Image (cartoon, rainbow, N blue to C red):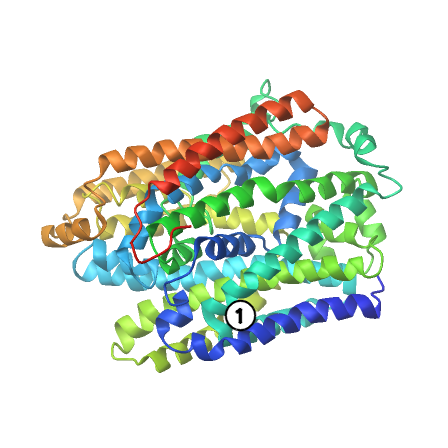
Amino acid sequence: MHLTALDWAIVALVLFGNLAVGLYVTKRASASSASFFLGGRHMPWWLLGTSMVATTFAADTPNLVTGLVRTGGVAANWAWWCFLLTGMLTAFVYAKLWRRLGVTTDNEFYERRYSGKPAAFLRGFRAVYLGIFFNVLIMGNVTLAAIKYGAVLFNVSPVMVVLVAGGVTVIFSAAGGLLGVLVTDMILFVIAMAGAIIAALYALDHPSVGGLDTLLAHANVADKLPMVPDMSDPAVYVPLLLIPLAVQWWASWYPGSEPGGGGYVAQRMLAAKNERHAVAATVFFNLAHYALRPWPWIIVALASLVVFPDIASLKAALPQVPENIMTDDLAYPAMLTFLPAGLLGLVMASIVAAYVSTISTSLNWGASYVVNDVYVRFMKPDATDKQQVMAGRVVTVLLMVLAGLFALTLESANQGFNLLLSVGAGTGLLFILRWFWSRINAWSEVAAMVISFAVSILLDRIDLGLASHEKFVLAVAITTAGWVIVTLLTPRTDEAKLKAFQAETKAFTEPGVVGSGVRAAAWGVAGVYSLLFGIGQLLYGNLTAAGLLLFVFTLATMRVLGAIKRVPVAEDAPAP
């Protein structure tokens, strides 16, 4: 594939624009650890919400969606659509609780909620487990996508992609901290969405595709179109729909969709200027993440089934791509090879934008864990703000090195996605209940992590003759039973600690508020799914169904906005 000077100029403009922003805000980001990791705690909802969306719009996301559609149809996206349920609960129940806690990282929760040495151990262990181990998994998967784009569109080696893409991103992240990430995320999200829409339009315009109507009628595509799987065949609907909606959404810990909130989503909520902004940001994130973004990727994925109907056709078209990364998710970057000069550069810039946004967030988030919850908590409690910021920059570089090395061992986006799901299977219910069931203690969380990890490894190594979704359910059952038993057998959290946590967050004393939050979350789920499927029905030409779904979306939106307005807000902070 030959890129023109114009294409290279557009890609370079995005890369160096990010560097410029990072360098510009370096002084402000370096003012304190709160500035570097939380942007000073006064961020508005629209900036935080857009940043959440931009972060989850990773370079690997179009590849993941393409792989799902090509292998299981549009309905296979329930593997991640199901996480809307926990996302809306996070918005209306947990966002307020996190903002009240007022910590620097969500790992500080453990020493606010639990007591004694187990709580301190848990805080440090989770910081390393998530900030390094899990974070490297995430970034490795995203970097794998960059490697595939580099192989298809630039014909460059995986090592060169890791060095260039990772190098630019790590410099930007180390310089600007979270503030730099938030500022650039707004621009990057616009670029990324524009690129995705352009890619979809040109995919439809491909001579083999012949437009939307012809695409939808094509024999290679017809059986991939349903948004709900065949409900007459358990072998189809159980893994694609039943397991995600009945188990996966509450049982799995997945980045950006943590039950009860956590990770970089919690980081954004903690950076909000008040509770209402935390709630509004999370609602906007869920709307844009699940309803606004998927369809351009799905259109490209469907078109790829016409242009590249199988792996053999991909291999024939892309002989320069290494054999070990030749999988269905490669069809998305393959479809980009048909873009004309200039537009190819813009779409590639959108992929670069998605990569930079996700990796920069993961680097800052992971560094905040290592610095705040390991370095300051256990190694140097008297560390100055300057020392903490410097430590954060060093950790940022080390995390990128580890992620790059791990990316070179992966093969497909689905591989990384399934690995993350399996390792976190069974821990989700604990994260939902720990704010409200006072019997849960530090050992409950230690048991959940250890059992989940051990079970996922054992089920991967031992052949029990089970399908992947059956292994997942078994892992959830074993892990959940394990941590509940440990909870009942180990000592309760110190009563004074529970009372202090209760006074600070009102977590145990607001059943009415929780009930109203659940109702608001239900309206949010109904609204986002209605918009998602309404857009789909509109594209499919089913105007009556589209109109009904969009009506439900409008009604749900009114309810959701009313719920946001009822969230209390400090008088000195403007409401969104």
x and y percent of residue 286 in the render?
49, 44
Q: Is 185 above or below relative to 389?
A: above
In the shown orientation, is residue 501 left or right of residue 165? left
Query: Residue 245: horizontal and vertical position, in percent?
Result: 47, 31
The answer to which quarter of the image holds residue 292 is top right
Q: Position of residue 484 (x, y in %)?
A: 26, 40
Task: In this rendered view, identify the residue nearer to me: 368 or 378.
Answer: 368
The answer to which of 435 and 469 lies nearer the viewer is: 435
In the rendered structure, which amino acid carries the disc numbered 1?
Met
At horizontal 31% and vertical 50% (from top left) the residue drawn is 569
Q: Relative to 75, say whether 406 is above or below.
A: below
Q: Quadrant of the N terminus?
A: bottom right
Image point (32%, 62%), residue name: 125
Q: Is residue 474 visible?
A: no
Question: Percent from the top left, x then y, of residue 178?
Answer: 46, 67
Q: Farthest residue toward the right?
A: 207
Q: Which residue in the structure is indicated by mark 1? A: 400
Label 1: state its secondary structure. Answer: helix
Badge count:
1
Callout 1: few (<14), some (14-19), or many (20+) C-alpha neighbours within 10 Å? many
Q: Residue at x 27, y 53 (%)?
A: 100
